[in-house]
Image: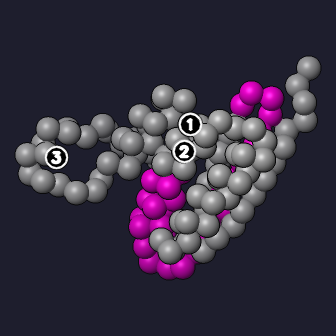
Amino acid sequence: MFKRAIIEEFSFPADIDHLGEMRDFITRTGRKYGVSERMINAFKLAIDEAATNIIRHAYRDWDGQITIRMIIRDVSVVISLIDQGHTFDPNQAKDPDLQRYVDIGKKGGLGIFIIRRVIDEI
């Protein structure tokens, strides 16, 4: 039988300057409940990319809030970012042509690709 889920939340202004607070929350909460450092670091990378996308795209026209919710149960961790910004379906994003990125020296635009790769590894 499963233990009751533990839910921890943290809200912060949707601003790049507050991403460090979000990463600290992930670290503190993960350590508090025995999540491995490898998983904590992977979560921080993926969630940092997702939060950055929310800040730059969902809230491009106004200030807002982001809430990070961590649900920990037995051997699983679910992390959600909750916002009220413009909607976007990341499932519609195609994987980038990495060789083209290198050839043209493009910077940025790899957030969803990075998130998918990191999460697939954990």
The N terminus sits in image quarter: top right
Alpha carbon distance from label 2 to label 1: 5 Å
- Secondary structure beneath dot 1 equals helix
Alpha carbon distance from label 2 to label 3: 25 Å
Determine which quarter of the picture holds residue 117.
Answer: top left
- Residue 86 can be seen, yes or no: no
Q: Is residue 49 one of those drawn in magenta?
A: yes
Q: Tell me where the magenta segment starts and ends, as one range.
A: 47-76
State yes or no: discs 2 and 1 in contact (Cβ < 8 Å).
yes
Q: Quick one: label 1, few (<14), some, or many (20+) residues within 10 Å?
A: few
| Identity of the residue drawn at 72% across and 62% down | 10
Nearer the viewer's eye, disc 2 or disc 3? 2
Determine which quarter of the picture holds residue 100.
Answer: top left
Q: Name the residue under label 1.
A: 38
Q: Is residue 65 one of those drawn in magenta?
A: yes
| Amino acid under disc 2 | Asn
| Amino acid under disc 1 | Arg
Give the left or right position of residue 99, taking residue 79 as reference: left
Looking at this view, is 39 or 13 the one in front?
Answer: 39
Answer with mark 2 or mark 3, whichever residue precedes in sequence: 2
Q: Name the residue under label 2.
A: 41
- Secondary structure beneath dot 3 equals helix
